[in-house]
């Protein structure tokens, strides 16, 4: 009788334990797959936004010699149809000289962002900023393309 009960318990317990382990392994593999898919989606999304931002910065750089009013008029469609672009404008000697946020008024960049700019602008650079004056608690990534020694276009 004891042998029969032991056999019956093993007959139930072994498949149960095996199925629990198989289910656990399947869950772990599915979780890893979901994480990989999510990571690839985020990387592709950030690459698309970055490419669009560099494209807009290049377009703004080509318009650097135009007047601020003409430049903003020309870039308003670009800004409207480019997702996640908050502002487009120009930096000159550490000042924002023309942008959708400041208009034609001159603002020192540190007044809006709380950070200073490099003394000389590299050809292309980007910087993430914890927050800006117009959007506290929101991360900002600034893409900058050099136009001249002391002038650059930013997005």
Image (tube, helix red, strand yellow):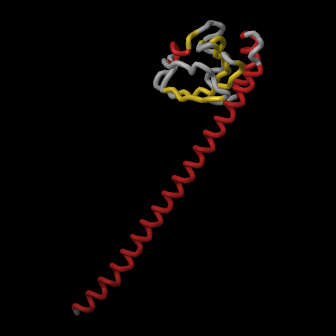
Number of numbered tags placed on the structure image = 0
Please indicate whether residue 121 sits to the left or right of residue 72 in the image: left
- In this rendered view, identify the residue nearer to me: 4 or 100: 100
- In this rendered view, identify the residue nearer to me: 124 or 51: 124
- In this rendered view, identify the residue nearer to me: 128 or 152: 152
Determine which quarter of the picture holds residue 13: bottom left
- The extreme left residue here reads 2
Above or below, 91 relative to 7 = above
What quarter of the picture does the N terminus occupy?
A: bottom left
* Residue 22 percent location from the top left of the image: 44, 71
Q: Residue at x 48, y 57 (%)?
A: 31
Above or below, 115 relative to 42 = above
Q: Residue at x 59, y 26 (%)?
A: 142
- In this rendered view, identify the residue nearer to me: 30 or 154: 154
- The extreme top residue here reads 105
Please indicate whether residue 137 sits to the left or right of residue 67 in the image: left
* Residue 27 percent location from the top left of the image: 46, 62
Q: Residue at x 51, y 28 (%)?
A: 139
Q: Residue at x 59, y 49 (%)?
A: 40
* Residue 26 percent location from the top left of the image: 47, 66
Please indicate whether residue 41 sits to the left or right of residue 149 in the image: left
Determine which quarter of the picture holds residue 123: top right
* Residue 155 percent location from the top left of the image: 64, 24
């Amino acid at each position: 009788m004891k042998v029969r009960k032991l056999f019956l318990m093993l007959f139930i317990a072994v498949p149960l334990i095996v199925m629990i382990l198989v289910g656990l392994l399947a869950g772990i593999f599915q979780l890893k797959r979901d994480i990989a898919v999510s990571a690839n989606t985020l990387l592709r999304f950030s690459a698309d936004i970055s490419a669009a931002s560099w494209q807009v910065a290049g377009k703004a750089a080509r318009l650097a010699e135009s007047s601020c009013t003409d430049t903003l008029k020309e870039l308003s469609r670009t800004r409207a149809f480019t997702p996640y672009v908050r502002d487009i404008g120009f930096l000159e000697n550490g000042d924002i000289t023309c942008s959708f946020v400041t208009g034609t008024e001159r603002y020192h960049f540190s007044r809006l962002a709380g950070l200073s700019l490099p003394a000389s602008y590299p050809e292309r650079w980007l910087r993430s900023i914890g927050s800006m004056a117009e959007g506290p608690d929101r991360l900002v990534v600034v893409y900058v393309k050099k136009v001249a020694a002391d002038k650059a276009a930013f997005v």
